[in-house]
Amino acid sequence: MNRQYAISERAHFMCPNMNFGILLRIEEEFDESRLRDVIDKMSAAHPFLKAVMAFEEETGKLFYSVGPDSMVKVNIEEGPFDLSLYESINKKERDITKEGLLEVYIYTNSGYFEVVMLAHHLLVDGRGLLQLAQELADCYVEGKAPIKAEERLIADISELPEGSRLSGMSRFLVQRANKQWKKEKHKISYDEYLKFEREYNLGHSIKYTSYDISDDEYSSMCKLCHENDFSINDLLMAKMYIKTGCKKIIIAADIRNKFSNYREGALGNYSTAMGIINPASAKDEVSKAREIHKTVKKFLSDNKKLMLVLACYFDIDPTLLDAAAISGMGGFESKAASFVGGGMFGFATPSSYSITNLGKIENRNIKSAMFIPPASPASIFTLGVVTVNGKMYACGSANT
């Protein structure tokens, strides 16, 4: 396997709250040796589960340092699980230059057990974590071995789809920030970041809330979508606009089909963010969802809009990306980094609302599941959604 560098992924390296999770319920008796064997098989199939992050001495590039053994930490507790437990495990300090990018928490109960898979964004995106969750359940229950899939990350901006490159004002602003950064001659170390993260976590808290969506409510939502030719995600955004009055919602778009190097089942980040403006002229849910559907369709068909965030990540100096979030939040003094982190990415003041919908799956080995979304410092509230075996599960993260 060739060395894999974190390029666009580097934006997640020195930023707090870049963890997210999936909670699974598996209706089998728990056997520790069986579970650890599953983790070993998954790690053999996915090299990033054996990796820590490291800097290349000669170039300063950030890369995934893959070792011979699994770096997945397994923690076993007596159940049941509730979200207050997630708040505490998510706040634990993690040095990902020494610790792996995935932790697994087991909560044992009579006749079943619950699994929380807590991943760093450098490992995978939400859909990739859902895939890992299914692999764990399938291997544990049926003995189905994960299929080996070596990671091949997006290595260069030239691999983005045609028409993705920055132009006009976006290009000018990034180039100006890079020039300013070079003049400032700043650089932030990972140790400095960990100190900032420690202080940030002491002064900030995240509230996680699960939402009970009845089968009747989900069925009504599906019926409404079918009758009006829009998606569940369009409808969820319409509901959020009406409830919160927010002006823009950030959603995640899966872009695996945009890259020829992507291997089915491989880990890594293959999603991008899109900011969808509230169609203020539409007042009711159906009208808003219809307008949202049109806007999302335009984004997905326009590579320049769809790939804007990724293109920025590729064009911004990597060491400037390291400092952006911290500087935007006032923890590091730099005009260039403050502009990128505060002005471009919104870290100065939490203001965004987000929805990440992982879609729907059918899996007989998973009784229930819940996606616990990240709580980016730039976000006020994020809703995570996944539908398993015909039932929708939702969880929100709110910075408080």
Image (cartoon, rainbow, N blue to C red):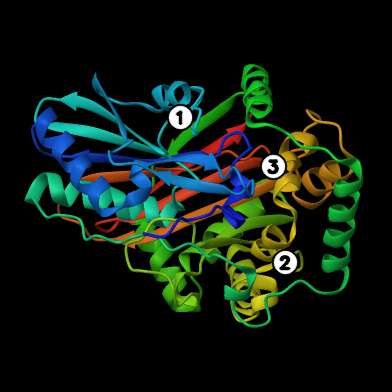
- Residue 361 position, x and y percent, is 29, 60
The kind of residue tagged 3 is: Asp
Task: From the image, tell me which residue sits under label 1.
Answer: 98
- Residue 93 position, x and y percent, is 51, 23
In this rendering, position of residue 203 left or right of residue 72: right
Q: Image point 64% across, 77% down: which residue?
A: 303
- Which one is earlier in the sequence, the residue at label 3 or at label 1? 1
**121 lies above or below 231:** above
Helix, strand or loop status at disc 2: loop
Circle 1 Cα neighbour tier, 10 Å, few/some/many (<14 / 14–19 / ≥20): few
Q: Quadrant of residue 7?
A: bottom right
Task: From the image, tell me which residue sits under label 2.
Answer: 279
Q: CA distance from mark 1 to mark 2?
A: 46 Å
Task: From the image, tell me which residue sits under label 3.
Answer: 322
Helix, strand or loop status at disc 3: helix
Q: CA distance from mark 2 to mark 3?
A: 35 Å
Q: Image point 44% across, 47% down: which residue?
A: 123
Pick the residue in front: 150 or 277: 150
Q: CA distance from mark 3 to mark 1?
A: 18 Å
The kind of residue tagged 2 is: Pro
Q: Image point 90% across, 58% down: which residue?
A: 176
The kind of residue tagged 1 is: Lys
In this rendering, position of residue 199 left or right of residue 396: right
Circle 2 Cα neighbour tier, 10 Å, few/some/many (<14 / 14–19 / ≥20): some
Circle 3 Cα neighbour tier, 10 Å, few/some/many (<14 / 14–19 / ≥20): many
Pick the residue in front: 240 or 208: 208
Res. 73 visible in picture:
yes
Helix, strand or loop status at disc 1: loop
Q: How many marks?
A: 3
Q: Image point 36% across, 59% down: which residue?
A: 1
Closest to the camera, between mark 1 and mark 2, is 1
